[in-house]
Image: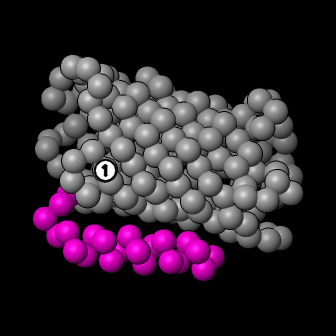
């Protein structure tokens, strides 16, 4: 937790020095269902990103799960993560977003650290609509004893309400380190730039 606190403090110090850049706050929620233990999870997300100018940004993510049924029996799991992002239009309407993150999973019986890698492909249709046809996340604990390795593939769509607000939706499937399905899910998000 000390490492994560240090990363958050560093992110806040950097953003304080660059007030003219854009911040984005995203709030989201969704549900996922696991065929492994027949449990349902309700998710909530809060994401903050700060543009450093050009193609680079930094941010933080807080994600909490309420697991119903299965082996979780109403367990609450929370992930806190610090991220760095690179975004670029590759060709015309096609863009990519690549990211790395480090975080901490807070859950019983113990908390543990992890790292994450992200890759997203986007296709801009017009000023309002963007397809997010390819979304990938790899996550793994620093200690293999935590059994936290996962791959997530998703697809989605974003609707830009105006220059500062957007809503988006995604569906996804999460696999374990052995590529067996762990969960299927969907989520809705609202973002605002300021």
Q: Is 183 on the left-hand or right-hand side of 83?
A: right
Find residue 182 and report its horizontal and vertical position in percent.
Answer: 75, 37
Find out whether residue 5 is within the magenta segment.
Answer: yes
Quadrant for residue 31, please give it. Answer: top right
Please, what is the dominant secondary structure of the magenta stretch? helix
Quadrant showing the C terminus: bottom left
Q: Is residue 44 above or below residue 166?
A: below
Q: Residue at x 84, y 42 (%)?
A: 37
x, y (%) of residue 173?
64, 31
Q: Is residue 130 visible?
A: no
- Quarter residue 149 falls in: top right
Which residue is rendered at x = 39% and y = 49% of the image? 85
Which colour assignment does the render follow?
A: one colour
The residue segment tinted magenta is 1-22
Label 1 sits on a secondary structure element that is strand
Q: Foreground: 76 or 79?
A: 79
Q: Is residue 13 above or below residue 45?
A: below
- Residue 31 in sight in this render: yes
């Amino acid at each position: 937790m000390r490492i994560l606190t240090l990363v958050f403090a560093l992110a806040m110090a950097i953003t304080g020095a660059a007030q003219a850049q854009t911040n984005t706050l995203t709030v989201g929620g969704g549900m996922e269902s696991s065929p492994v233990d027949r449990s349902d999870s309700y998710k909530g997300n809060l994401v903050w990103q700060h543009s450093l100018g050009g193609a680079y940004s930094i941010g933080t993510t807080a994600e909490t799960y309420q697991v119903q049924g299965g082996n979780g029996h109403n367990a609450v799991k929370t992930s806190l993560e610090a991220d760095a992002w690179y975004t670029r239009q590759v060709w015309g309407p096609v863009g990519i977003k690549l990211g790395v993150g480090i975080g901490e999973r807070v859950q019983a019986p113990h908390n543990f650290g992890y790292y994450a890698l992200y890759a997203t492909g986007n296709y801009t249709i017009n000023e309002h609509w963007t397809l997010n046809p390819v979304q990938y996340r790899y996550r793994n604990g620093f200690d293999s004893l935590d059994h936290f390795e996962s791959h997530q593939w998703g697809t989605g769509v974003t609707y830009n309400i105006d220059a500062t607000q957007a809503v988006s939706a995604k569906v996804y499937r999460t696999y374990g380190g052995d590529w067996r399905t762990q969960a299927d899910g969907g989520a809705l998000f609202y973002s605002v730039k300021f």
